[in-house]
Amino acid sequence: MNRRQFVVASASACACVPVAALAGCVGGRGDSITMLAVNQDDTSHRITVWVVRGERLRVAETVDVAPGDVERLGEMPPDGGSGDPYRVTVRMDGDPVLVREFRPDRWFNQLDVVVSADGTVELSRARAA
């Protein structure tokens, strides 16, 4: 178990700490953007994600995530201030569940796909300290 998995596992045991808030790696402004699949559901899921930035595919990965577990999806280069939009597409268990496009309005180094306890999927974009 690496440090990140330990922190996430420890935090998930405490209902007062949102798991997604602790899921990314520790870093600073010039560090890569880490992507994780966080499964808060009581069912295993297969998560497929594609991230396109501008015209370039940055992440294309499929992982199987056990209930209450976290799996690494990939890593992207830091923002670099280009202003190009990110387009994130997520499939869960083969079904399309999320398509989001956004322009970075603030620095972040964590972009996670979170499956909530009710089976809904969302993106969590944050700064990991």
Image (cartoon, helix red, strand yellow):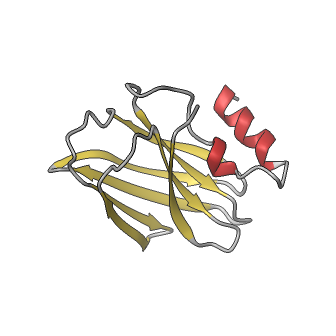
The residue at 41%/63% (across/down) is: 90
Residue 6, percent from left and from top: 74, 33
Residue 31, percent from left and from top: 41, 26
**Residue 127 horizontal side relative to residue 21, left or right:** left
Residue 95 vertical position relative to residue 128 in the rendered view, above or below = below
Residue sticking out furthest to the front: 105
Residue 18, percent from left and from top: 71, 52
Residue 70 vertical position relative to residue 34 in the rendered view, above or below = below
Q: Quadrant of residue 45?
A: bottom right
Residue sticking out furthest to the left: 55
**Residue 2 visible, this orientation:** no
The residue at 71%/57% (across/down) is: 67
**Residue 117 visible, this orientation:** yes
**Residue 127 horizontal side relative to residue 13, left or right:** left
Q: Which quadrant: the C terminus? A: top right
Q: Which quadrant: the N terminus? A: top right
Residue 106 vertical position relative to residue 67 in the rendered view, above or below = above
Residue closest to the eye, 64 or 39: 39
Q: Quadrant of residue 50?
A: bottom left
Residue 13 vertical position relative to residue 2 in the rendered view, above or below = below
**Number of labelled discs?**
0
The residue at 52%/39% (across/down) is: 127
Residue 77, percent from left and from top: 32, 32
The residue at 44%/41% (across/down) is: 108
